[in-house]
Image (cartoon, rainbow, N blue to C red):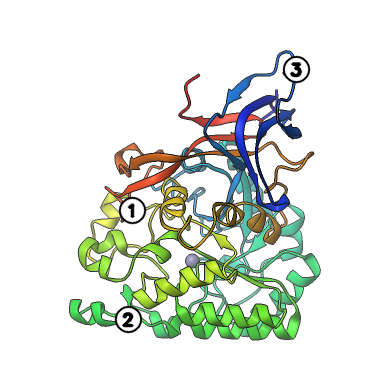
Amino acid sequence: MSKFSADLLVRQGRLIDPANGTDALGDILIRQGKIVESRPNLPTPPDVPILMATGLVVAPGFIDIHTHLREPGYEHKETIQSGTAAAAAGGICAVAAMPNTNPPPDSSDHLQLALERAQTANVRYYPIACVTVARRGSGSLAPLEELAKLGAVAFSDDGDPVEDEALMRRALEIARDLDRPIFPHEEVKSLTTGGCMHAGEVNARLGVKGMPAAGEEEMVARDIELVRQTGGPLHIAHISTAGTAQLVRRAKADGLPVTCEVLPHHFVLTDCEVEHQGTAAKMSPPLREAADVDAMLTGLADGTIEVIATDHAPHTAAEKAQSLTQAPMGIVGLETAVGLTLTYLVDRVLSLQEAIARWTCHPARILRLPGGALTQGMPGDLTLLDLTREWEVVPAHFRSKSRNTPFAGYHLKGKAVATIVGGQIVYSELAA
Ligand SMILES: [Zn+2]
């Protein structure tokens, strides 16, 4: 049996499928990795394993379009195997992997290497290739067309911006012709270099250099203007400020092909957390102010922000034990993101169906991925949610090789309890 092409009958779940606007009790049959049928009381074909989902939500497989798996090059932090095991344990059926690896996927050979390594993946793996050679943000463009042919679903120099405006313009023109988005990390380095947290009251009190909101917003404004001129699709990574949310809102109102994502820590935490947790709360873009958190919630509620992603960024304990100014940016997220979404958003700013859409049909549409819906013929990827499960975040239990999270000890309500990829149960807490 090849990978992710199993048979499975999931019985008596609450099937929620935002793409089709449905929410009803029923069964779902997967054959050879694809969804065959879903309705109440499906007959049981012989030789098909059964998974009982009584009391659980059965959603299309969640997709995390912003993950750092660190392989090749930084396997001491994470591998494709361990990172995708973390994804499975977090209810994530597919990841799009960011290209800040060593080597980065900036050529056919380098992308082939990543794809070979990805044979070990426990969930679906989609590569995001570089915009520029060596992720320099200047110099020359990577061969985007070749990389797209090999399966790159988007282009990003994530971790760093594409600072050269002419290159970004050309990349957007090519992206338009290829119908694959440019997926930028928006940062004006001259405004942020040396900064280790948001520039506001807290960094002033701590006496460390800050990263101002303008360091994100000015690059977002530049890139939206380039979209206006080129028509190239732009998916803005990890927005974090009220100003950025407003820029995206206007761009969408103008009908531009601009979308964006938010990370759970940017709708849950503020920069105060850096004072309490130090490097565990250090990431880029940084945690912002309460008004920015409110803007993330408003942006989610009004549809400006269509995607939630993790920006899962593993670092070792030794790396994060350095000083606030020295430690690397980033936190892990694959094993907490779904619980944080269910706890902090559902029935507060989003309906359950709207929250699921931000992990399924919206990311699938933006990266042109198969899946994201329970439609017949789609990949048999399912995320099973127990909305009543109360649990504590215990980093020692993570499948990820790294433990760098500001959410240790958080009590969450709602959890992914089984993850199915192509009919194959890749993670389950359910009794056999
Ligand atoms: Zn980034």
Residue 110 visible in the picture: no
Gap between marks 1 and 2, in whole Å?
Answer: 21 Å
Cα separation between marks 1 and 3 = 44 Å
Element assignment for label 3: loop
Name above or below for residue 281 compared with residue 302. Answer: above
Name which residue lies at 50% across and 67% down: 238
Residue 192 location in percent, x, y? 39, 80
Amino acid carrying label 1: it is Thr
The residue where tag 2 is placed is: 199
Q: In the figure, is residue 129 to the left or right of 337? A: right
* Residue 317 visible in image: yes
Determine which residue is flagged by label 3. Answer: 45
Asked if 256 appears above or below 279 in the picture, the reply is below
Q: Nearer the viewer, mark 2 or mark 3?
A: 3
Front position in the image: 41 or 427 = 41
- Looking at the image, which residue is at 60% across and 77% down? 139
Q: Secondary structure at mark 1?
A: loop
Badge 2 local density, few (<14 within 10 Å), some, or many (20+)? many
Question: Three-letter amino acid code at disc 3?
Answer: Pro
In the picture of the structure, the residue carrying the numbered disc 1 is 405
Q: CA distance from mark 2 to mark 3?
A: 60 Å
Look at the numbered disc 1 and say if its residue's Cβ is closer than 8 Å to ligand 1: no
Residue 55, placed above or below residue 216: above
Precedes in sequence: disc 1 or disc 3: 3
| Dot 2 and dot 3 residues touching (CB under 8 Å) | no
Give whichever of discs 1 and 2 has the lower sequence position: 2
Residue 420 image offset from top left, x and y in percent: 59, 34
> Is disc 1 surrounded by few (<14), some (14 to 19) or many (20+) residues within 10 Å?
many
Q: Residue at x 54, y 67 (%)?
A: 301
Check disc 3: other Cα within 10 Å, few if <14, some if 14-19, many if 20+. Answer: few
The amino acid type, in three-letter code, at marker 2 is: Ala
